[in-house]
Image (tube, rainbow, N blue to C red):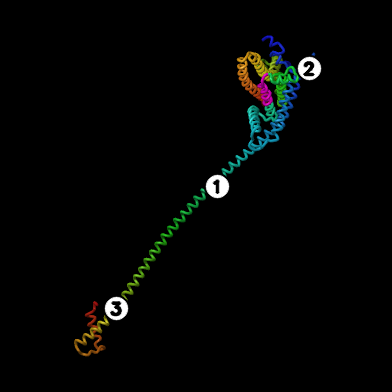
Amino acid sequence: MADQSHGDSGIAGHLQYWTLKLDESNPFMQIHLDTMLVSIVVAGGMFIFALWLKGRLVEGAPTGAQNFMESVVGFIDQTVTDNFPVKNPLIAPLAFTVFCFIALVNTIDILPAFLLGNIAHMFDVEHFRPVPTNDLNLPAAMAMSVFVLVLYYEFKLKPVHFCKELVMEPFTSLVPVYLRPFVMPINLILKLVEEVAKPLSLSFRLFGNMFAGEVIFLLIAFLLLGGGAVGMAAGFFVGLAWTMFHLFIGLLQAFIFMILTVVYLSIAHQPVEH
Amino acid sequence: MSLDLTFIGQIVVFLTLVFLMKKYLYGPLADLMDARSTKIAQGLAAADAGKEAKAKAEAEITEQLKEARTKASEIIVAAEKRSAELNEESVIKARTEAQQIVDSARDEVNAELNRARQTLRNEVADIAMIAAEQVVEAELDAKRHAKLIDGIVSSGFGNA
């Protein structure tokens, strides 16, 4: 077990990325080609699907793909309008993209654990991680985009109020006036932690869930599939059960990421209370 | 497991995807759905307006029917009244006419009766003359004794 975990063919070996190192000495200067490839393929697929659907949109009663996408759009539109005090035309498409993209990418995880890896091996790629959400870079990139957007709207819609909140909350009103300059740095630190926690929790939640799911797939594969006929059968059914559960988790995480994006942005859009 | 250039790449991919989705999938779909809900709302409003108009027309029809019915019953009542009057008039007229007919018949009958009585009286006078001639076997001057005979006849056959 210990050998497997640390060996190149063990679980850890399957958790290696297909990496292009641009600068050996700097760990930042590398690209996970598998993450980029799969996410671009999925994004391209979504784009092609969008173009295909756009060409056959009908104004009358929708059918098939259009009907399905309309129900998704309607669902997200409803979520956004429920949470938003004002109308912002960017939020709903953003939430829609977040939801669909994460859901699709997460769904790749239900493919058999080694399938894409083995296909990649045929092309002389040593390591291949099929699910981009298992790479912290993708959730972090999305969370950071959302965070920057939140900051942008905070500064755009209520700059004075936001800056005041940064240094005045939560302790200022609790201390005497002469102590206020001293608590301001504490307020600022607390507030910064609060703000930074948003993208951190957003990205780590998705990454952690999907990563753990993949590790469990690998565990099932390593522990059960190697153990003879009974183990194979058990592994198949346990794997099937976990596949279904993981499919559900993938959808759930996509929904959570989407709804938190909407909620963070809606907080930024809340009108200032006097 | 650490952040690297993939992070930058993913930001680019994500933002591009957001832009593309907004432009090519979400935008058209949302526009279409908006257009459709507007259309449906208009259709429903039109249906409501039509229903309202129909209800109004029905109310109008009911009103007119009621009016017509009232008018008709009024007309019927008037006609019945008129016909009763006419009936009565005709009855009265008929009765009068019948009375007139009866009266004229009675006059005629009386005249006939008188004429017959006169004729009879004359005939009786003649018979009496003949009878008297035969009884007295004398020639009587009809002209001379006419007055006498008339007196006899009227005293003897006064009730004839």
Circle 3: element type = helix
Chain under callout 2: A
Residue bearing the label numbered 2: A21
Looking at the image, can residue B43 be seen?
Answer: yes
Residue A39 horizontal/vertical position (percent) = 72, 23
Chief SS of the magenta region: helix
**Classed neighbour count for the residue bearing mark 3: other residues with Cα under 10 Å, few (<14), some (14–19), many (≥20):** few
Residue B67 horizontal/vertical position (percent) = 50, 51
Tags 2 and 1 on a common chain = no
Magenta-drawn segment: A98-113
Residue bearing the label numbered 3: B116
Circle 2: element type = strand
- Dot label at residue A75: none
- Dot label at residue B57: 1
Residue B103 colored in magenta in the image: no
Alpha-carbon span between mark 1 and mark 3: 84 Å
- Please state, as top left, top right, bottom left or bottom right, where the N terminus of chain B lies in the image: top right
Question: Residue, x 23% and y 82% (percent of image)?
Answer: B153
In the image, what residue type sits under mark 2? Lys
Tags 1 and 3 on a common chain = yes
Residue with the most extreme left position: B136
- Please state, as top left, top right, bottom left or bottom right, where the C terminus of chain B lies in the image: bottom left
Chain under callout 3: B
